[in-house]
Image (cartoon, rainbow, N blue to C red):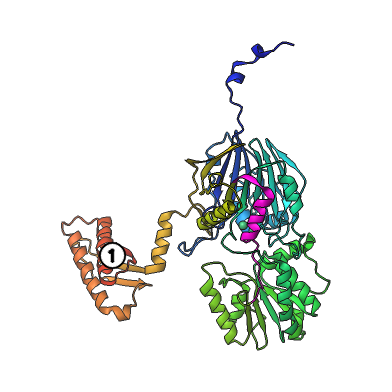
């Protein structure tokens, strides 16, 4: 035997045989929303999830925020192997219609229910090409470039949620977003811990795990417990039951339907999103509903109130949801009456507390009996609590650990939980959006390199058209109102015709601010006359002077900054 080394080409000698995998979170690490993570090996990219985020109160008029994909669009040499979608919630699927075209329609891999939800939503975007979606299932391996991925089943509050065991050149990466362990779930299979242990047993390099529940002690509540707690409410309710929850909470919808069937109630599903999800889930057999249980409003009038359940959205106090229309007496068929029972079966998303409280108060005033999740365990989070998160780490026994899916404080707390189950601190990476994480079999490095992740905002007009400037203008309008000055200037003399006209909206009430308005008018006259005193009338110059000086004057007087809009007309 002799060696054939000398026949190797020079570039083969110099080419580094690397096992380096880059992990780049484009969203989801500083918020709960817009989840999207890249796994990169050489120039191959595997994408997990394409989610959106709902905007905060400081972003008026913005419908939602989607991940920034400049890193991919600016580097056409990178080859997208495919997109794996973990489950059907909007923070994981919501950006598909906005990004799939820019990504050039890569193949999407996901479970059947998620596929159904994605395709249904896609109907709202008729200009897009047909999506290519391939169904995947727990235990069935798929191979994408150098990545071999085996999905595993996890519980969440929507069926068909998948975790992913990703065999990569850097070793095994376990990806567990949105999960809890539920041994008695509703409309879903129980947690399969042994499958997770099996997949992880060859040795796991890195675990990425859901941090949403990292600040909640104990175990998350089983859906069975929720059912047990809802049962007496259904048993004792003397009139109609109106149960409000998230449209995507298929397991809760199933509970309400089973309990209604148990106590001989017919069910009305109200609201477009809820109806759509129920239709998809029923068609794909994720919901079991007896024939005749679901009825329409036309039949409802003939039914004893004690025999009727209404399932609807609005548990977050959303202004456009069904529950709000009922409360505001704007619903076509339903008015609250005495003996009605209203159940809020979802937690309150932070920021919505006041809106929810207002809805509860209105319902109570109108005579309804109101149950809320704080009073009873009638809602369970879809995310594991501290003990569940520790269990996941113990099952997987990873060398390295990276918390995902949560605000920074949650990631931090999750890191501490990992330490408490013996993951050394130096092996834990708390990343931020856009940070490039470099992984190989025996090292993880959170580099100081970042890819762009600034917000891409979507409003009714389009994607990314809304810039910071527009947003600031909307904030100003929302907070301090608008102040319009109409000045008619004499072409010849450069002086003001008549009094300037002033219109104020959302800033001061004109009738009560006569003095301020008069002072302003006087100042407008001075500014116009001064600005045109050299006889060279320059409309823009007059406008700018008015905007700046009147803005300053109003701020001095009121400590508010309305948007000042001068309209200068030459006549
Ligand atoms: Zn989810
Ligand atoms: Zn999520």
Residue shown at the point (21%, 64%) measured from the top left = 527
Disc 1 is placed on an element classified as helix
Side of 285 where 557 appears, left or right = left
**Residue at the (67%, 87%) spot, across then down:** 339
From the top left corner, tell me how far across and down residue 299 is, in percent.
77, 80
Q: Is residue 213 visible?
A: yes
Q: Position of residue 88 (x, y in %)?
A: 67, 57
Tell me residue 4's x, y (percent).
Answer: 69, 13
As drawn, 42 above or below 159: above
| Image quadrant in which you'd find residue 324 | bottom right
Query: Which residue is found at the position 17% from the left and 61% from the top?
Result: 530
Which residue ends up furthest to the right in the rendered image? 291
Q: Is-magenta flag for residue 390?
A: yes
Figure quarter occupied by ligand 1 = bottom right
Q: Quadrant of the C terminus?
A: bottom left
Pointer 1: what residue?
551
Within 10 Å of disc 1 (Cα), the crowding (few <14, some 14-19, many 20+) is some
Judge whether residue 135 can be spotted in this image.
no
User: Which image quadrant is residue 156 in?
Assistant: bottom right
User: Relative to the observer, which residue lies in front, 567 or 87?
Assistant: 87
Q: Is residue 146 left or right of residue 528?
A: right
Q: Residue at x 67, y 51 (%)?
A: 394
List x then y, in percent, for residue 427. Answer: 56, 44
User: Which of these two is toward me, 460 or 497?
Assistant: 460
Q: Nearer the viewer, residue 461 or 67?
A: 67
Q: Which residues are magenta?
A: 376-400
Towards the viewer: 386 or 292:
386
Q: State how many labels appear.
A: 1
Q: Is residue 178 left or right of residue 281?
A: left
Whether 158 is among the magenta residues is no
Split into 4 quadrants, where in the image is the N terminus?
top right
């Amino acid at each position: 035997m002799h060696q054939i080394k000398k026949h190797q080409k020079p570039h083969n000698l110099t080419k580094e045989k690397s096992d380096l995998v880059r992990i780049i979170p484009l969203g989801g690490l500083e918020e709960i929303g817009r989840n999207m993570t890249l796994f990169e090996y050489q120039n191959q990219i595997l994408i997990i999830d394409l989610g959106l985020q709902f905007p905060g109160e400081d972003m008026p008029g913005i419908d939602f925020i989607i991940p920034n994909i400049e890193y991919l669009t600016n580097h056409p040499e990178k080859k997208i192997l495919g997109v794996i979608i973990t489950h059907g919630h909007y923070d994981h699927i919501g950006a598909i219609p906005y990004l799939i075209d820019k990504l050039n329609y890569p193949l999407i891999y996901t479970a059947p229910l998620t596929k159904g939800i994605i395709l249904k939503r896609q109907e709202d975007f008729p200009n897009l090409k047909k999506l290519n979606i391939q169904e995947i299932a727990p235990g069935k391996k798929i191979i994408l470039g150098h990545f071999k991925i085996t999905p595993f089943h996890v519980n969440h509050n929507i069926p068909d949620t998948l975790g992913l065991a990703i065999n990569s050149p850097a070793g095994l990466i376990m990806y567990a977003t949105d999960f809890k362990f539920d041994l008695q779930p509703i409309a879903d299979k129980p947690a399969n811990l042994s499958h997770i242990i099996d997949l992880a047993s060859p040795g796991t390099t890195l675990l990425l795990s859901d941090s949403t529940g990292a600040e909640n002690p104990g175990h998350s509540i089983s859906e069975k417990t929720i059912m047990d707690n809802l049962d007496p409410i259904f048993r004792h309710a003397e009139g109609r039951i109106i149960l409000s929850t998230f449209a995507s909470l298929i397991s809760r919808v199933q509970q309400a339907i089973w309990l209604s069937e148990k106590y001989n109630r017919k069910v009305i599903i109200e609201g477009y999103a809820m109806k759509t999800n129920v239709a998809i889930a029923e068609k794909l057999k994720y919901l079991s509903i007896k024939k005749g249980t679901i009825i329409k409003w036309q039949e409802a009038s003939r039914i004893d109130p004690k025999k009727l359940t209404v399932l609807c959205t609005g548990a977050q106090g959303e202004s456009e949801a069904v529950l709000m229309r009922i409360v505001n007496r704007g619903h076509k068929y339903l008015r609250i009456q005495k003996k009605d029972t209203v159940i809020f079966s979802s937690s309150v998303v932070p920021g919505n507390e006041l809106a929810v409280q207002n809805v509860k108060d209105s319902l109570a005033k109108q005579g309804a009996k109101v149950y809320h999740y704080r009073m009873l365990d009638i809602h369970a989070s879809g995310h594991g609590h501290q003990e569940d998160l520790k269990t996941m780490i113990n099952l997987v026994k990873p060398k390295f650990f990276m918390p995902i899916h949560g605000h920074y404080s949650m990631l931090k707390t999750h890191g501490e939980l990992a330490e408490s189950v013996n993951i050394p601190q130096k092996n834990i990476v708390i990343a931020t959006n856009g940070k490039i994480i470099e992984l190989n079999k025996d090292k993880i490095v959170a580099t100081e390199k970042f890819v762009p992740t600034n917000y891409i905002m979507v409003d009714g007009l389009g994607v990314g058209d809304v810039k910071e400037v527009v947003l600031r203008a909307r904030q100003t309008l929302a907070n301090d109102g608008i102040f319009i000055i109409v000045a008619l200037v004499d072409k010849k003399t450069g002086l003001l015709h008549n009094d300037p006209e002033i219109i104020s909206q959302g800033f001061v009430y004109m009738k009560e601010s006569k003095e301020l308005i008069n002072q302003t008018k006087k100042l407008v006259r001075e500014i116009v006359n001064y600005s045109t005193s050299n006889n060279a009338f320059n409309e823009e110059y007059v406008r700018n002077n008015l905007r700046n000086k009147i803005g300053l004057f109003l701020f001095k007087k009121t400590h508010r900054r309305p948007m000042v809009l001068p309209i200068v007309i030459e006549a």
